[in-house]
Amino acid sequence: MATYTGISSEAFRHPLDRQAEQALRSLPGFDLVARKLMEFIYERPQLIYLMGNTIQVGPRQYSTIYQIFRECVRDLDIYPEPALFLSQNPQADSYALGQEHPYIVINTGILDLLNEAEIRAVLAHELGHIKCGHTILIQMAMGAMSAASALGRFTFGIGNFVTPALIYAFFEWRRKAELSADRAALLLVDDLNTVMSSIMKTTGGSIKYANECSLQELIRQSENYQVLDEDELNQVYKFLVYSGSQSEMLSHPFPVERLHYLQEWAVSTEYQQIKQGNYMRSPASGAVDVKATENAARNEEIEKLRQKIAQLQREIDRMKKSD
């Protein structure tokens, strides 16, 4: 496995992730919501809960998993080492949170359903969130959703500022952030099929019928899904599904879309350059080094996201009037 000493998250961060975050931060009310939520997001109670209710993985506790984890931490050049916890939960899921003390939680369902290479992909994916600094924004998104659902109760004084547009922007960013984390998984595993099979198994894998689950069929399904965009009405329906008009907003892209983006990046010059050691390093100051030539295109994409958010707000208002 390759080790990417000194690598900056900007080397592999998906441009849609970067653009969605900038669009989110530019929305009215974001700064106030961010300040208020940061006053009430405490990591210590979360860590106390995990220390008391899960198993902390270490050299003498799930040592095989810990060794894989340590290798991923080294290869993505993350310091200090985040904590890793294992939760008794049959759902094949995992997540990363924390700012001052980032940590990762994986469910036992992951260990039961995936092989070691696929577990590496899952751990690398979560470490990608930490490397990109996603974890604090994820916590803020969760806090904003809680405040929105608690309107009329104690909401830290931000209830009036958590607008549908801001909620949508948080979810839009969260979905795009997954694309960057998937890239981190591909870098550390260096096998496209392994990363895609980890996505397939956590989507609809079965231990009993594992021999009947085909990655190639899911890839074909992904290709068929992309064809749907040829019909503009399908694009509208996709937007409405993601925005929660059918049930609730989705925090992750559809798995078939994640496969599509991964396949694109796996054959890109950018990916090959990183594999050869030609990648952006983290500046000593810790600042993000972004080329000025990218600004115009990025601003254009941000404006598109703002228009999409405005479109959603109009649709929400229309639906409210029709009720």
Image (cartoon, rainbow, N blue to C red):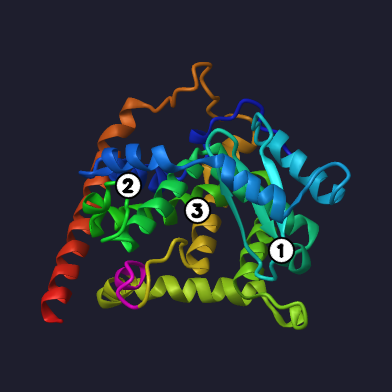
CA neighbours of label 3 inside 10 A, class few (<14), some (14 to 19), many (20+): many
* Residue holding disc 3: 178
Task: Name the front one of labels 3 and 1.
Answer: 1
Given contact means CB atoms under 8 Å apart, are the residues at marks 3 and 1 in contact?
no
Q: Position of residue 62 (x, y in %)?
A: 84, 51
Tag 3 secondary structure: helix
Q: Position of residue 144 (x, y in %)?
A: 35, 52
Chain-order first, disc 3 or disc 2: 2
Q: Is 46 rendered above or below residue 318?
A: above
| Residue bounds of the magenta highlight | 239-246
Q: Amino acid at mark 3?
A: Glu
Q: Please tell me which residue is depicted at 31% across the width and 53% down the height of the picture.
A: 169
Q: In the displayed orientation, state which residue is furthest to the left.
A: 321
Given contact means CB atoms under 8 Å apart, are the residues at marks 2 and 1 in contact?
no
Which is more toward the observer, 164 or 209? 164
CA neighbours of label 1 inside 10 A, class few (<14), some (14 to 19), many (20+): many
Task: Please give the label number shown on residue 110.
Answer: 1
Q: Is residue 289 magenta?
A: no
CA neighbours of label 2 inside 10 A, class few (<14), some (14 to 19), many (20+): few
Which is more toward the observer, 312 or 307? 312
Q: Is residue 244 magenta?
A: yes
